[in-house]
Image (cartoon, helix red, strand yellow):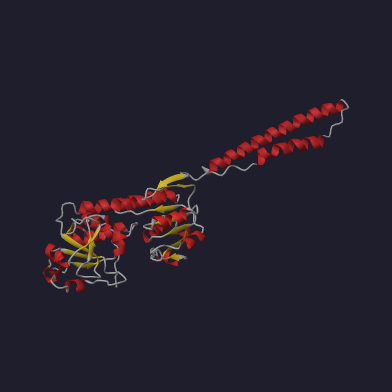
Amino acid sequence: MPQSSSRADSLTSAIHTALLLLFVRLISGAVAQVRRRAVRVPVRAFVAAVLIAGMPALSAPAQAQQPAGFPMSVTDDAGFASTILSPPQRIVSLSPGLTEITFALGAGNRLVAVDSYSDFPPEAKAIQTRLTTYPSPSIETIVSLKPDLVLSLAERDEDIALIRRQGIVVLKLFPKDFDAAVQTIQTLGRVYGSADAGASIATDMLTRRDAVVSAVADAPRPRVYEELDASDPDKPFVAGPNGFYGQLIDLAGGTNIFGDLPGDVGQVGAETIVERDPEVIILTDADLPFNPQTPEMVAARPGWDGITAVQNGAIYAVPAALYSTPGPRLVQGLEHLARLLHPDRFSARASLRLPAIALW
């Protein structure tokens, strides 16, 4: 399209020039006839005036073309509609997952600030300024950076309102499951002017998810206990039926022993875990910065020696980021979990691209 527009502009300019020259010649001929009738006319001044009058048509620059798809209206996960006039060039991300998505879409170089936990990809660690988001990010710092887009995961509505009052677009994006994470990637792809990149990542994630679901479709579904935080081992926080954690268990071919909880996450008593006798234990709290758990610590808990998973050594420490970050790597977490639950369904030559895991 840019080449076609350039050729059209050149042709238009040439036509204008030809018409102007023809007009000048006609005027010059008329002036010559007037001279023969002894009328004195300042020919050069007259022709100069004609040329000047024609200059705007020849030199007016072509109107700048608006990027395809802009302006666009985007409604975020809080139901707030924002108008985005052009692809943002100065972005603030207040969530590791949204930072990861931004890099995956090729817009990492537009980030002017990220939250203090944004550490993937490695390039994210080099971004300054780094913002502490709890209990609230520094509104003054954010505004001083003059961003044209702020990405929020779970900031308070009053904080977001303060930023918006400064004329800054804020998108609150809080995907709660696999499909929502894919949709967020597609949305940001459009916002960044990188719709094709967003569609490509989305297609890859959905294709790989479907491959896992197909591979485990007729496999026995083991009972799975997924631990999120055992700062208090007698009342750990566990994965409920929905959200990233619970949904991945289902997609990977397992049965969540706490699939009957009312929320995505719940706190339960240790005796209930023993009673429900999980066959597989997944520790997403193995790499927490506080009270990290190990398979050995879990196996040594009072009364847990009778649990099937403990007796069979089926206690697995996993990287929490792959299981809970709403970004492109979420599908890696699914593939990793599926292989833990059904190793027989994924041979060494399987097409699943599993990450190298090193927790310690």
Q: Which residue is drawn at 54% across and 40% down?
A: 4
Instruction: Quadrant for the C terminus, please.
Output: bottom left
Q: Is residue 83 above or below residue 125?
A: above
User: Which residue of the protein is positioned furthest toward the top in this rendering?
Assistant: 37
32 relative position to 113: left or right: right
User: Which residue of the protein is positioned furthest toward the right in this rendering?
Assistant: 38
Q: Is residue 84 above or below residue 326?
A: above
User: Which residue of the protein is positioned furthest toward the front in this rendering?
Assistant: 158
150 relative position to 268: left or right: right
42 relative position to 354: left or right: right
Q: Which residue is drawn at 17% across and 73% down?
A: 301
Report if residue 204 is visible in the image: no
How far across and down, in percent of the image, does residue 56 sit? Answer: 67, 39
Count of number-bearing discs:
0
Q: In this view, does 85 lie above or below 96?
A: above
Q: Determine the image quadrant of residue 117.
A: bottom left
User: 228 or 313: nearer the eye?
Assistant: 228
How far across and down, in percent of the image, does residue 72 sit? Answer: 45, 45
Report if residue 341 is visible in the image: yes
How far across and down, in percent of the image, does residue 111 sit? Answer: 46, 59
151 relative position to 284: left or right: right
Q: Determine the image quadrant of residue 255.
A: bottom left
